Image: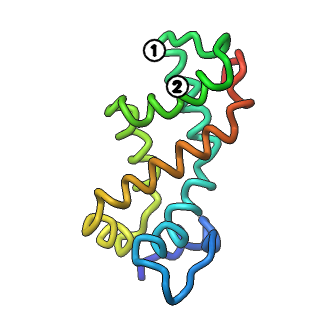
Amino acid sequence: MNQRDLFLKEFRGESIGTISTESSSDEIFQNQVLRPVLKLQNDLFVASFHNYISKNKIDFYSQSIEKKLFTIENAIQKDIKFRNALKGMVIALFTVEEYVTYIKNSSSLNKRMMNLLIERLKSQVQLFENSSV
């Protein structure tokens, strides 16, 4: 393992979530890689969504909570450019070995990644108030 990989694993920290003998390979990857990366990158995701709101001139701040939650989900699911930017923020913190694992099942892992990210942003909807980052 090279220095970059060692640094990334140490920098991200421990696994988040339970891993058991019944865990699927996707679930193991989610808890060992995706969750720690998403936690580490959280402030960047919040700033990125603030920018998304601003650049797309979305009247987000006057919306009801339900509409805000829908907007978060819709932005990540429907806007391919935004979604790809978010994926890049996650994939950039993979080790080479993790990337090799990721590309073998990227479709399923992308779905997990985006669902976790949507839930993470929704749980922090209160951070999206009318303010600049």
Residue positioned most to the bottom: 21
Judged left or right of residue 122, residue 53 is left
Q: Crowdedness of circle 2 by 10 Å Cα count: few (<14), some, many (20+)? A: some
Q: Kindly identify which residue carries mark 2.
A: 71
Q: Does 61 appear above or below 82?
A: above
Task: Say which of 128 and 122 sits in front.
Answer: 122
Task: Say which of 113 and 38 sits in front.
Answer: 113
User: Which residue sits at x=53%, y=72%?
Assistant: 32
Q: Position of residue 56 (x, y in %)?
A: 45, 14
Q: Does 81 appear above or below 97?
A: above
Dividing the picture into quadrants, the one containing residue 17 is bottom right
Kind of residue at badge 2: Thr
Quadrant location of the C terminus? top right
Kind of residue at badge 1: Asn
Quadrant location of the N terminus? bottom left
Q: Does 15 appear above or below 51?
A: below
Q: Kindly identify which residue carries mark 1.
A: 56
For the image shown, how many numbered marks are present on the structure?
2
* Whether residue 48 can be seen here: yes
User: Which residue sits at x=53%, y=28%?
Assistant: 70
Q: Position of residue 92 (x, y in %)?
A: 42, 55
Q: Position of residue 43 (x, y in %)?
A: 64, 42
Residue positioned most to the left: 104
User: Which residue sits at x=45%, y=29%?
Assistant: 75
Label of residue 2 in the image = none
Q: Crowdedness of circle 1 by 10 Å Cα count: few (<14), some, many (20+)? A: few
User: Which residue sits at x=30%, y=60%?
Assistant: 106
Task: Say which of 57 and 94 sits in front.
Answer: 57
Mark positioned earlier in the residue sequence (2 or 1): 1
Tell me the SS state at disc 1.
loop
Query: What is the CA distance from the residue labelled 2 to the residue labelled 1?
Result: 12 Å
User: Viewer-nearest of labels 2 and 1?
Assistant: 2
